[in-house]
Amino acid sequence: MIRYRAYAKVNIFLKITGMRGEYHTLSSRFMRVKDLFDTLWFEEKATPEFEIRGSFDCEVHANTIYKAYKHLLAVTRSDKLSSFFESHAVCVDKKIPSFAGLGGGSSDAATFLTMCNEELELGLSLNELAEIASHIGADVPFFVYGYESANVSGIGEVVERFDEPLIDFEVVTPDIQISTPSVYRYYREHLYAPISAEEAARLESTPSRDILAFMSPKEANDLYPSALACYSELSEKEGWFFSGSGSSFFRIK
Ligand SMILES: C[C@](O)(CO)[C@H](O)COP(=O)(O)OP(=O)(O)OC[C@H]1O[C@@H](n2ccc(N)nc2=O)[C@H](O)[C@@H]1O
Ligand SMILES: Nc1ncnc2c1ncn2[C@@H]1O[C@H](COP(=O)(O)OP(=O)(O)OP(=O)(O)O)[C@@H](O)[C@H]1O
């Protein structure tokens, strides 16, 4: 069976532009971390229940891969899909840390969608896959497109490739389980200051290396001050940028 890589991402910048219902709209640059990825493949099995093999700290129904399976099944109603998973397990060699702001669960879900589409010849377009992805989680569409660098907006469903060289990052993940909803909630209640459309457009046209050279880590990520306020055990790391809602820090190697 073919092995697929589910890469981690970092947010070079992450600025809030407003609210859409309970969710925040954002303007963010996502970049792939080229040497941090989970590996996924399918393997034959004997029992008919949907099975995910790998080291996860959640039950199968809470796994983003299972959510992706259910959404894909609801959209395609494909017998090929359901019968395939009666005889095949999804195997994951997990390397991306969880609760890390690196999009690990989201990347697994997106890679699973791509694998099903390719190996079972479901015939879905990239845009159709990305639409399904947007119902699984805000970060999932970015991973479906597979771009190395992209501007991501809306609540995560608008993904536009950004043409620039991939940067080699060093990533560290403090052992603090950060809750993304808590960090967004604190931001909304205490720090809410959305940027203008002009400011978003300026950031979206700036190469990642320039962002990292000219912005401070706290300026670059609106969720960083919020995560620091929510988690007293999280401390600033001089010279390092903060990814998503944390807890990972990154810098150019
Ligand atoms: C922090 C980021 O990782 C940056 O890339 C994303 O914005 C969050 O992506 P994610 O973990 O895939 O988020 P989801 O699983 O869709 O949402 C988790 C929770 O985060 C909050 N949330 C998420 C995305 C968003 N644009 N606004 C939000 O307010 C909501 O409370 C939501 O219930
Ligand atoms: N495929 C998956 N891989 C890892 N964790 C998963 C997965 N599916 C569900 N989870 C659960 O989701 C929670 C967060 O894991 P995840 O890897 O998505 O990290 P995250 O850092 O919150 O991601 P993000 O960067 O999107 O904020 C954990 O409780 C984990 O048990």
Image (cartoon, grey):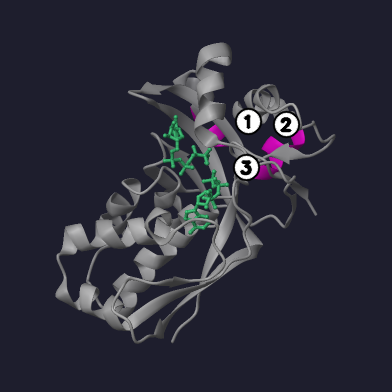
Residue 221 numbered tag? 1
Q: Residue at x 45, y 58 (%)?
A: 59
* Residue 208: x %, y % from top left: 64, 43
Quarter holding residue 104: bottom right
Magenta stretch: includes residue 145: no
- Say which amino acid is labelled 3: Pro
134 in relation to 97, above or below: above
220 in relation to 107, above or below: above
Residue 207 numbered tag? 3
- Say which amino acid is labelled 2: Pro
Crowd rating for badge 1 (residues with CA inside 10 Å; few <14, some 14–19, many 20+):
many
Distance between mark 3 and mark 1 Cα atoms? 16 Å
For mark 2, what is the residue?
Answer: 217
Q: Residue at x 63, y 30 (%)?
A: 221
Q: Which residues are magenta?
A: 201-214
Does residue 118 appear left or right of residue 253 in this picture?
left
Q: Quadrant of the C terminus?
A: bottom right
Question: Regarding mark 1 in the picture, which secondary structure is present there?
Answer: loop
Distance between mark 3 and mark 2 Cα atoms? 16 Å
Crowd rating for badge 3 (residues with CA inside 10 Å; few <14, some 14–19, many 20+):
some
Question: Regarding mark 3 in the picture, which secondary structure is present there?
Answer: loop
Judged by depth in the image, the label closer to the viewer, 3 or 2, is 2
> Does the Cβ of the disc 1 residue fall within 8 Å of ligand 1?
no
Distance between mark 1 and mark 2 Cα atoms? 6 Å
Quarter holding residue 127: bottom left
* Residue 123: x %, y % from top left: 22, 71
Does residue 184 appear left or right of residue 226 in this picture?
left
Q: Marks 3 and 1: CB-CB under 8 Å?
A: no
